[in-house]
Image (cartoon, helix red, strand yellow):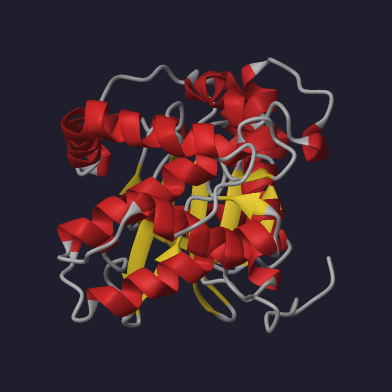
Amino acid sequence: MAKRRDGWSDELSDGRRRKKRRKGRDLNKDEVHHESEKDAFVDSLDKDQEQVSWMKESRFKRMFKEIESGLAGVMGDGSFEWVDRRVFDSVFDRLTLMSLYKLMKLGAFDTLDFPIARGKEAHVFHGTSADGPVAVKIFHTSNAVFKNLIQYIEGDRRFGGLKRRHRDLVDIWVRKEHRNLTRLAKWGLAVPKPIGVHRNVLVMEYLGTPSAPSPRLRDVEVPDPHSVFEELLEFLAITWQKAKMVHADFSPYNIMWHGDKPIVIDVGQAVIHSHPRAQEFLVRDVTRLIEWGQKNGLDVELAETMYDVLEMDTSHIEMLEEE
């Protein structure tokens, strides 16, 4: 039987109570949200937008001419007038286009081909680069969703001097996701490889086929749930013990099934040990893993699994590259 340590007993008992109290409600909320995210990309942008005069300025015209062919895939094949495209105000605003231009000039990607995911915080596009396909995640700059995510930024000493302006929060969040991906990848953890970042645009490894992204774990029936559970358990243990972090939103919605193994995505909200809510987030992550395991017929419990995360022998795990 696991011996409880100071600081964890309250979190464990609170986690059990929250699990019983919110079991049905959380799943329903998640299902409603993620089903809504399946709406067609174009439909979400199909609204009248005013033309903006900045596109006609000579310096932006030159920039557009350089990157027009690279963005033709997501804007509609063939020639088109930039000023008349209604998606600009929703996704491709001026600063976003400048960020895309910067990353294209740096070689992070060459073209944006088609949208592959849509969420409250960002749209993700399939892209191509000299080294193969990439995922280009463009975070929204025109809504206030990031104000609800301050809890994951405040308390992280890596991002001091937090500003409350929306655009600043977006830029901090994107840098945070890039830095978290980098940190996790250096410990050999299964996350998309980060490739480039500039302001509200993050370029990373693409997970999928030439025509579609890999499915989420929630949408597949894995052949051996026990081995997948053990793999995800090790992910949490190495993240906590070695990378000194906690994912903070560890659910089957944020795990992709690629190459017959789970790959963890959406790490922007991940926090370091010193964050005041780190222990709470870890218990929540383990609880979600337990729920997935139980749904797949596994006999797993919170206390024992929590003990495994904290006490698993990870002495053989070494950093692949110094931070």
Percent across and percent down for residue 320 are: 74, 80
Percent across and percent down for residue 156 are: 74, 35
Is 66 positioned to the left or the right of 267 in the image? right
**Camera-side residue: 57 or 248?**
248
Residue at 83%, 29% (x, y): give it: 160
Percent across and percent down for residue 73 are: 38, 58
Percent across and percent down for residue 126 are: 41, 62
**Camera-side residue: 278 or 97?**
278
Is 201 positioned to the left or the right of 296 in the image? right
User: On the rendered image, what quadrant is the C terminus found in?
Assistant: bottom right
User: On the rendered image, what quadrant is the N terminus found in?
Assistant: bottom left
**Camera-side residue: 162 or 227?**
227
Residue at 35%, 82% (x, y): give it: 259
Identify the image quadrant of residue 96. Answer: top right
From what the image shows, is residue 288 above or below residue 304? above
Identify the image quadrant of residue 224. Answer: bottom left
Is 11 positioned to the left or the right of 229 in the image? right
From what the image shows, is residue 272 above or below residue 108? above
Residue at 57%, 44% (x, y): give it: 268
From what the image shows, is residue 103 above or below residue 150? below
Residue 76 appears anywhere in the view: no
Residue at 37%, 60% (x, y): give it: 255
Residue 150 appears anywhere in the view: yes
Q: How many marks?
A: 0
Is 221 positioned to the left or the right of 240 in the image? left
